[in-house]
Amino acid sequence: LEYYKSTTYPNLFSSYPMLIRNFEKVDFSAYRKKISKTTVDPRTVLGVTYDGKLIIMTVDGRWKNKATGMTLVQVQDFLMMHFYPKYAINMDGGGSTSMFIKGEDVVNYPCEGVSGSSEKTYNGTFKERGLVTYFGIREIK
């Protein structure tokens, strides 16, 4: 709370782990909690480009023969190759990875399964999960 009060940033997001810091991939070995470099899952990622533009990315997964997901290292590599962000953070993923755009509905393929499973994929009807985080973005002119 003290940091938020003292910062000039209008919005702060908190999650785990940080993926990119100051244009460099974060070394996950620095975290106290072990982070898997091999777990492939759906992902939700927020990033900021060098000029302050927001990147919102979802990675689909757990869809047999369609989309397996990505490891955190693969996400880092993808971001660096295509966006070269100043900062990026992994948000909640797995079955919580859903992107909704007003006027478009759900624009990705959410899954219902557990990590490592491709059996319980999205059935075509978006349903609210028991634990979910929402945030909205609107353009201010």
Image: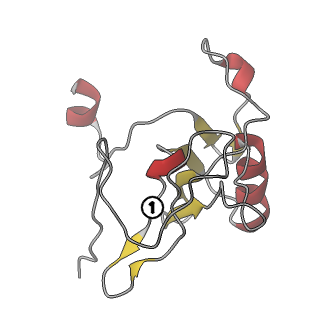
Mark 1 secondary-structure assignment:
loop
Q: Nearer the viewer, residue 120 or 92?
A: 120
The scheme the figure's colours follow is secondary structure
Q: Residue furthest bottom?
A: 103
Q: Position of residue 43 (x, y in %)?
A: 58, 51
Placement of 5 over or under 102, stated as above or below: above
Amino acid type, callout 1: Ser
Q: Nearer the viewer, residue 63 or 133?
A: 63
- Give the quarter of the figure containing the C terminus: bottom left
- Give the quarter of the figure containing the N terminus: top left
Confirm whether residue 49 shows in the render.
no
Please tell me in which quadrant of the rendered image residue 4 appears: top left
Q: Residue at position x 57%, y 48% from top?
A: 87
Left or right: 27, with 105 as reference point? right
Q: Nearer the viewer, residue 125 or 80?
A: 125
Placement of 19 over or under 104, stated as above or below: above
Confirm whether residue 13 shows in the render.
yes
Placement of 46 over or under 1, stated as above or below: below
Left or right: 17, with 130 as reference point? right
Q: Position of residue 45 (x, y in %)?
A: 54, 53
Mark 1, Cα crowd under 10 Å, few <14 / some 14-19 / many 20+, is many
Left or right: 23, with 132 as reference point? right
Q: Residue at position x 51%, y 33% from top?
A: 16
Please tell me in which quadrant of the rendered image residue 81 appears: bottom right
Q: Position of residue 78 (x, y in %)?
A: 75, 58
Placement of 84 over or under 73, stated as above or below: below
Provide the residue designation for mark 1.
Answer: 98
